[in-house]
Amino acid sequence: MSLINEHFLLLSNNYLFSEIAKRVNAFKADNPHRKVISLGIGDVTRPLPEASIEAMTRAVREMADTRTFRGYGPEHGYDFLIEAVIRNDYLPRGVKLSPAEVFVSDGAKSDCGNIGDILSTENSIGVTDPVYPVYIDSNVMCGRAGTPTADGWSNVIYMPCTAENAFKPQIPNRHIDLLYLCYPNNPMGVVLSKEELKQWVDYALANDSIILFDAAYEAYIQDPAIPHSIYEIPGAKKCAIEFRSFSKTAGFTGVRCGYTIVPEELTAATKSGERISLNRLWNRRQCTKFNGTSYITQRGAEAIYTPEGKAQVKQTISYYMDNARLMREGFAKLGIEAHGGENAPYIWLKTPQGLSSWQFFDKLLTTANIVTTPGVGFGPSGEGYVRLTAFGRKEDCREAMERMCSVG
Amino acid sequence: MSLINEHFLLLSNNYLFSEIAKRVNAFKADNPHRKVISLGIGDVTRPLPEASIEAMTRAVREMADTRTFRGYGPEHGYDFLIEAVIRNDYLPRGVKLSPAEVFVSDGAKSDCGNIGDILSTENSIGVTDPVYPVYIDSNVMCGRAGTPTADGWSNVIYMPCTAENAFKPQIPNRHIDLLYLCYPNNPMGVVLSKEELKQWVDYALANDSIILFDAAYEAYIQDPAIPHSIYEIPGAKKCAIEFRSFSKTAGFTGVRCGYTIVPEELTAATKSGERISLNRLWNRRQCTKFNGTSYITQRGAEAIYTPEGKAQVKQTISYYMDNARLMREGFAKLGIEAHGGENAPYIWLKTPQGLSSWQFFDKLLTTANIVTTPGVGFGPSGEGYVRLTAFGRKEDCREAMERMCSVG
């Protein structure tokens, strides 16, 4: 009798974004003439940088000619992209990486989900509350999250982020093996200073923990003092894996490209205490269960590092950050407490009048026809908040703020 | 202390294709003026179909304009591609599928590797010997393969394929939970008739087994009586998952696209005997740990189903199959026993004079400067064979055969 992986049955069937879609679709069906504006899901709306378009058009053409056609590429990505990443994303910040430490992939979501393959399912997990659901769900699937408890999972340690701690988790006072950190943060829009990030690296080094650092939104950092990479902190190469994405930087949500850094000096232990290189294990995982990212896509990603590409990316980021500013200023005028949106594309909005996340979600949907994401969907400490994204069209953002002003 | 997944340490570091690369590179370094012809790795050399090139060029252009830009696509693929797959690859063969049964991905290798996520690690595994190494290695990584034994893995049942059984495995006389079958076969180049495949489906239905059917090479079938899909066999939807790929059909090895069929009526059990839909579990897996395939790539794949695309794909397949014919005829003249190459792009060559796989590999490399793949690298029953692929350039194939004739 063939058996299923029963851990899957522990997962909730009510996925946050499908519940949102259900409510939005019901509202639209009842109100076909209302224009609904989505500030809910974190998907981009601006086109790809022209430099990427040109590079991808050329790459497609190369695939049409026997002399320039490319078949299987390296599982870990082409050197031209890996070298561009090292030279542009890391060297200017004082971080030296070898090409073997950079693994190009089809996106940070895949890598965040798959990285667990190389780690024992016995490791304990620490996550912020609220948190991006993929970190937890992928651990539930392989059994690492443990069993459901009254308020979470038996093997997951939740680190609450509330107004009291400025939405930044306290350093744990107990041992945790694997720590998921995402900065700039989704959903709360906050960032960590170098000093704050250093405390986490120090904790990880002292506890022999591994930090899984999701830096998918680093391009939105405006403050020059904020670190973009965890490797800007001394010692981080001994304790951290970093996930990066071209999705929010260059609009690649539908093109699919990201990369993951697994430093050569990063090790974890066998039960008998032997230290094993995680770089070697991740390389073996990727060579066996992945076959590289599209050559065309990789050429598109490489192009964002050209002078034109850089300027075009900067323009797109400015467009979105201008949306964020517009929203922040609007909420200030309305007297609604709003966080984030200064170094991140997310705004974390306190619900007014003590409304719950879902109550405020419903109110905004029905009165102002605006879609948000209920904060409680990211974890219990998100109750009383909704998340707004700055990835919309400027005219929609402006209209959304006007509607909010008029409904009050 | 963070722990690694120790199953990874059981994997051999000597990956077949890296050992080949090592020997080839050493030979080239010693003989810089010899032209080495590779008939080893199964990578394509013909350019993409012009229909795909045009479709991808248009799709790239769409991504440059706000009005046609596409962000996140559906995790399981766009309807336009799913519908083209159903209408062209299945309906003409009498197989009806619903769109929810088709999962577009970045390739069959990823899906073959990841499918284990939804199945218990306690299931026993059956594989042909010789076999595509990913089936076994991905099961070693998650512990399902068990522990190494003198001649394999404790939880893997090997089904020898030798000249005695015409390279087709016997139906097992014991219970196996998960069966990996690949037809047209890599590496042996053989196919199964409808009657033969029916025996496997009947076995799986009687034993409550799941067949993981890798049909990546179905486009190479020339004999109209040979089934392209396992679902051509009645009952297969209750016991089989099918993997398909655009890699060898349309030259997408570097573009990355495939799809996996998980029928809605396919179930496996919990330990308490409850039947669970595998379609639902795979959908949850993909939504959590995958974010869809590039929109541009999917447009390229869709284009192979246009009349022009179909004609172009047919031409490419004919080119490769003509290589296969050329090689088979050459070996017949030379009096070397060769199998496959009639409905598959692989030729399974008996080594002459009782040479081992690696001895013949070395002989061909050093005397004729031809790279093959030693059969023993695919499993012990592959000893005494080498695999040749038909994916090379015609002129190289022809020259390789001439060299073989002259070295004798």
Image (tube, coloured by chain):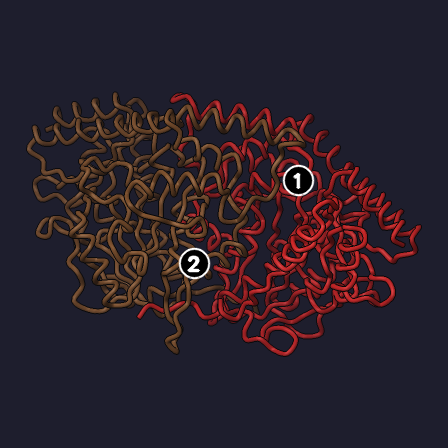
Chain colours: A brown, B red
Residue B220, x across and y down, in percent: 74, 44
- Secondary structure beneath dot 2 equals helix
Residue that mark 1 sits on: B89
Q: Residue B296: x, y in percent?
A: 51, 32
At a point 62% along the width and 34% down the height, the residue shown is A69
| Residue A167 locus on image (x, y percent) | 15, 49
Left-right relation of A383 to A44: left
What is the x, y in percent for residue B89? 66, 40
- Amino acid type at circle 1 is Asp
- In the picture of the structure, the residue carrying the numbered disc 2 is A279
How crowded pointer 1 is (Cα within 10 Å; few <14, some 14-19, many 20+) is rated as some
Say what amino acid the circle numbered 2 marks. Asn
Residue drawn at x 37%, y 40% is: A87
Q: Is residue A50 visible?
A: yes
State whether residue B223 appears in this view.
no
Residue nearer the viewer, B219 or A270: A270
Front-lying residue, B137 or A27: B137
**Above or below for A49 versus A152:** above
Residue B238, disc: none
Q: Residues within 10 Å of mark 2 (few under 14, many from 20)?
A: many
Q: Residue at x 21, y 54 (%)?
A: A129
Return the chain for callout 1. Answer: B
